Image: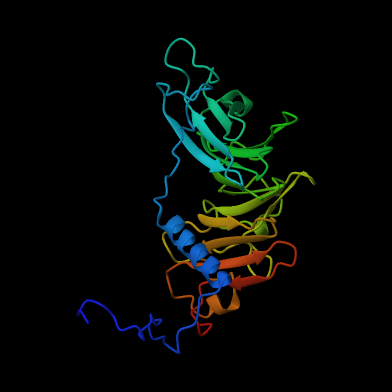
Amino acid sequence: MPIHQRPPYTRDLPPPSNPLQKPMSSDVTRWLHLVLWLLLLVARPVVAEVRLVTGDANGQLHDQDSFVLDLSGDGNLVLFTSGPPPSGTTPGIPTAGLYLRNLTAGTLTRVAEPADGDGSSIVEATLSDDGRYIAWHSARFNVFWRDTRTGETRRLTPEAGKSRTPILSADGRFVAFVSTSRQIVTDPTQLPANGRAAVFVHDSQAGSTTVASLAHDGRGLATGVGSQAPSLEFDLSADGQYVFFATDAPNVHPDRAQAASQTYHWTYRRHRQTGLVDIVCRNAAGE
C-alpha cells in the first residue's frame, strides 16, 4: 500500500477532551460582554465642559472685572458681580451690580445694584439655594438682604461699626454676618468688648436680629487674651439653626475657662434656640 493512503479500518476521531472544561453558557458570555463594555466606558477620556459665566447676555467677554461670589445648591445659578461697561453698551450688563446667570436657561438677570444699598460697590454676596434671596455687604461695610422676586431690600446694619461677610441659610430666611456695631441689639450684655466683633443672625420672616456668638450662659464674648478679634471666622448651618465661630474668648465654654491662659482660638458650635454650646476642636479623645 502506498504510504500516503490510510488503512481502510482507520477513521477520524475527535480530539481528546478535557474533562474539567465545560462549555460557556450564554449568560456568562453576556456578563463578560457587559464587563468589557463598562471597562471601555470607564477608560474613555472625560471631556470637561468649560463655560464663560461672567460674560454678557450673549455669553461674550466684556471689558470689565467680574467675580463669581456664590452658586445655587444645584450649581445651575451663578451669582457674580461686575463693574460698569467701560464704554458704549454691554448686552445684559448696563450698570455695575450683582448678576445671576441661569446656565440651563442661558439667561442673565441683574438682581441688585449699588443704588439698592448704600450706593457703594458690592463686595461680598451670598445666594439662597433657589436663587430667590441674596445678601451682600457693601464697600461701606453695611449688610443688605434682598428678595429678588418682590424687589424688597432690607438694610440690616447701621452706619456705626463694620459689618461684613453675610451667609444665607439654604432657604434664604436667615442671614448671618459679623459686625463690630453696638447698635444692632439693645442688650449690651450680649455684646463683646468694645471694638470686638460678634456674629449676628437676621430672621427675615420675623424681622428680628439677634446675637448668635454667645457664651454658654447667654452672655457676650469676653475680650479674650489673643490679639485677634473674636468671631471673625464663622459659618451658618443650612437650616439656620446652628452657628459656628472661632474665638479666643475664655468664657464661651466651662472647659475653655479652665485653659484661660491659652492664647489660641477655639472653634464652637452653638444652637440658636437652645443656647447649647459645643467645642468642635476637640481631639479624638474628646480633650
Is residue 128 shown above or below 41? above
Q: Is residue 126 left or right of residue 90?
A: right
Task: Give the number of callouts.
Answer: 0
Horizontal side of residue 159 vs 150, given as left or right: left
Residue 52 lies, in percent from the top left, at 45, 32
Task: Using the image, determine if residue 251 lies above or below residue 186.
Answer: below
Kindly tell me whether residue 8 is visible in this rendering: yes
Most distant residue in the bottom direction: 19
x and y percent of residue 159 in the render?
59, 36
Looking at this view, name the residue that lies furthest to the right.
Answer: 206
Out of 114 and 148, give the one closest to the viewer. Answer: 148
Q: Residue at x 22, y 82 (%)?
A: 1
Q: Nearer the viewer, residue 50 or 155?
A: 50
* Image x and y of residue 214, in percent: 64, 63
x%, y% of residue 261? 44, 75
Q: Residue at x 56, y 30 (%)?
A: 98
> Measuring 64% from the left and 65% from the top, which residue is drawn there?
270
Q: Residue furthest top?
A: 88
Q: How is the image coloured?
A: rainbow
State whether residue 29 is above or below residue 126: below
Left or right placement of residue 193 versus residue 212 in this view: left
- The residue nearer to you, when weighing 40 against 64, is 40
Judged from this view, the residue extending furthest toward the left is: 3
Residue 247 shows up from this direction: no
Q: Nearer the viewer, residue 178 or 224?
A: 178
Residue drawn at (41%, 81%) of the image: 14
In this rendering, the answer to whether 179 lies above or below 147 is below
